[in-house]
Image (tube, grey):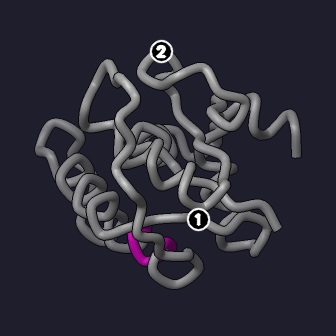
Amino acid sequence: MRCAVLDTNVIVSALISPKGNAAVILGMITDNLLKPIYCQQILREYVDVLTRPRFGFPETRVKESLTLFEMFGVPVDPRKSDFLMIDESDRIFYDAAVASAAVLITGNLKHYPREPFVVSPADFLFCV
């Protein structure tokens, strides 16, 4: 089973487009085809972003999404890297992927170092 860290934008995309690549990836979690990697800081980021009024996501849908990580996921305690990041808030996702030797799936490839384990949702699905 593959393990992956999901950038927040993947969760947002899944909730906006229930038939898109990001939604397929979330479905892989419930189908036991993908094991999500998370830490408490990542869960806090998910909550912060998914509950923003501009998205208007129903509270029940947000809770369902977060429950996926707690029920099916693997918690990690990543060590903070010193790699230069464009957006410092993305560091935790990168560090969690490094700590767990997992794939990092993001819709913002430009925010992360060019590494083979940092992929877009489409690229991830192409490779599975």
Q: Is residue 68 covered in magenta?
A: yes
Q: In this image, 116 relative to 52: left or right?
A: right
Return the x and y of residue 5 as percentages of the image width and height. Answer: 54, 53
Q: In this image, 60 relative to 18: left or right?
A: left
Secondary structure, mark 2, is: helix
Secondary structure, mark 1, is: strand
State which region is magenta. 65-69
Q: Between residues 14 and 38, which one lies in front from this camera angle?
A: 38
Specify the principal SS of the magenta part.
helix
Return the x and y of residue 87 as percentages of the image width and height. Answer: 28, 25
Q: Residue furthest front?
A: 82
Disc 1 target residue? 36
Return the x and y of residue 2 as percentages of the image width and height. Answer: 78, 61
Q: Between residues 37 and 28, which one lies in front from this camera angle?
A: 37
Q: In this image, 50 relative to 90: left or right?
A: left
Rounded to the nearest whole Å, what is the CA distance between mark 2 and mark 1?
22 Å
Disc 2 target residue? 110
- Badge 2: residue crowd in 10 Å (few <14, some 14–19, many ≥20): few
Which residue occupies 64% across, 29% down? Answer: 120
- Badge 1: residue crowd in 10 Å (few <14, some 14–19, many ≥20): many
